[in-house]
């Protein structure tokens, strides 16, 4: 069973335009719709669409449209009353796939509500293979909320594996509890590298920061600097493998594995022993909202089926690509994905970054199937964009 905790769920409203957004002008939509949202909720929706057991834990009052929607689709869930409606997020999509989001902050969660949510997660985690802690934190919640959730789960006699998909300070705090998996996008990975003082080591220190000052200056990276670093990561799986390797080696405590999503560049999976890149052929992007959540769902589905890390990565990218082809915050079903279109390539990320990265056969991760130096038949790119919503 895959259990998800979404601290800041949403009702996602999507508006599809016939042309580019024109600021200050009136435009008519060609399509509009609304779907249940929040990163953990989206993971559970994708898992449920594969007819696999899942349960979503979230704050919200009975009768709220999000909770009613979960009831309507038969998705198992538990909630804690807040006395306030669940927020709405607005997404505007353009014909070329450009996606613009306006996210509300969400309702404040009291310390008592937070404690109830953690108790619910601990109660259900005993039956879970994975617990996913995902999304932004609403007002009133300290940055260490997901770190506290990990600590609570790890007190169980047989704790499940834990995946974290958030950003900024909540992600940095969660790393202190060594989650089994984190799923940053390129910008989130760049932020982690900067905070850890690893930009120079990975050859990404083009922001004018020296290595000693990166940690203090992480929050001061300009949007342009962050986008520049993220673009370099998205364009180079080898560079991303080098960056994830540096983070895995340097962070003690830190994550045990990293699933880094690279937009149209697919995704890189890195463990302490190996790294792989998966890509999907170019395709028409309809909406990127929720694609990262479906990428994570695909990876966890593969893992719970006993697949090797590289095969689970292939399923992840196939799920992300399929989600990007759907309107709104759509989640694919197994029949919607094209696993055969995905190519998985083993990567080697050397400890020294002075030499270029070369493809080679990695040491298999524990429990994985040994790979050869030939790409798996699972070439191209998978459109995917996400944020801690």
Image (cartoon, helix red, strand yellow):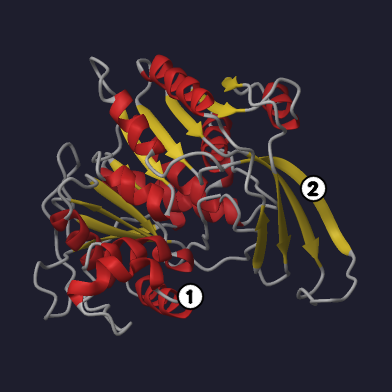
In the image, is 158 to the left or to the right of 28?
Answer: left
- The residue wearing badge 2 is 33
Q: Image point 53% across, 47% down: which residue?
A: 337
Whether residue 266 appears in this view of the structure is no
> Residue 274's quadrant in the figure?
bottom left
Q: Between 51 and 3, which is closer to the camera in this rendering?
A: 3
Q: Is residue 133 above or below residue 264?
A: above
Query: Is 213 or 131 nearer to us in this picture?
Result: 213
Q: What element carries label 2?
A: strand
Q: Quadrant of residue 229?
A: bottom left
**Mark seen at residue 223:** 1
Left or right, 384 with respect to 121, comes to right
> Which numbered dot is residue 242?
none
Q: Nearer the viewer, mark 2 or mark 1?
A: 1
Residue 379 versus residue 49 in the image, above or below: below
* Distance between mark 2 and mark 1 Cα atoms: 31 Å
Above or below residue 82? Residue 157 is above
Q: Give percent across and percent down for residue 249.
A: 13, 56
Q: Which residue is drawn at 42% across and 35% down?
A: 132
Image coords of residue 44 (percent x, y)? 53, 32
């Amino acid at each position: 069973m895959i259990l998800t905790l979404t601290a800041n769920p949403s009702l996602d409203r999507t508006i599809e335009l016939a042309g580019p957004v024109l600021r200050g002008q009136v435009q008519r939509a060609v399509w509009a719709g609304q779907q249940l949202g929040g990163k953990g909720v989206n993971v559970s929706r994708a898992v449920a669409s594969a007819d696999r057991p899942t349960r979503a834990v979230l704050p919200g009052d009975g009768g709220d449209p999000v909770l009613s929607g979960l009831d309507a689709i038969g998705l198992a869930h538990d909630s804690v009353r807040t006395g306030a409606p669940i927020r709405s997020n607005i997404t505007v999509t353009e014909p070329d796939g450009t996606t613009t989001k306006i996210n509300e902050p969400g309702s404040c969660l009291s310390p008592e509500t937070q404690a109830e949510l953690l108790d619910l997660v601990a109660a259900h985690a005993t039956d879970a293979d994975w617990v996913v802690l995902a999304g932004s934190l609403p007002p009133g919640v300290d940055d260490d909320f997901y770190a506290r959730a990990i600590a609570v789960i790890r007190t169980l006699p047989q704790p499940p594996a834990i995946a974290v998909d958030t950003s900024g300070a909540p992600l940095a705090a969660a790393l202190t509890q060594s989650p089994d998996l984190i799923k940053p996008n390129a910008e989130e990975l760049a932020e982690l590298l900067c905070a850890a003082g690893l930009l120079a080591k990975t050859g990404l220190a083009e922001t004018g920061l020296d290595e000693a000052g990166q940690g203090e200056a992480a929050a001061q990276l300009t949007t342009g600097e962050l986008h520049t670093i993220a673009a370099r990561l998205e364009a180079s799986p080898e560079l991303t493998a080098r960056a994830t390797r540096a983070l895995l080696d340097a962070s003690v405590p830190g994550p045990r594995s990293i699933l880094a999503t690279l937009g149209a560049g697919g995704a890189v999976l890195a463990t302490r022993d190996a790294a792989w890149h998966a890509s999907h052929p170019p395709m028409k992007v309809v909406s990127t909202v929720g694609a990262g959540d479906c990428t994570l769902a695909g990876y966890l589905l593969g893992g719970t089926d006993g697949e090797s890390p590289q095969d689970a990565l292939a399923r992840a990218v196939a799920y992300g690509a399929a989600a990007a082809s759907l309107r709104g915050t759509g989640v694919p079903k197994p029949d919607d994905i094209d696993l055969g279109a995905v190519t998985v390539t083993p990567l080697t990320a050397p400890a020294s970054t002075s030499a270029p990265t070369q493809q080679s056969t990695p040491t298999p991760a524990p429990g994985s199937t040994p790979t050869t130096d030939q790409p798996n038949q699972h070439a191209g790119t998978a459109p995917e964009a996400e944020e801690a919503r």
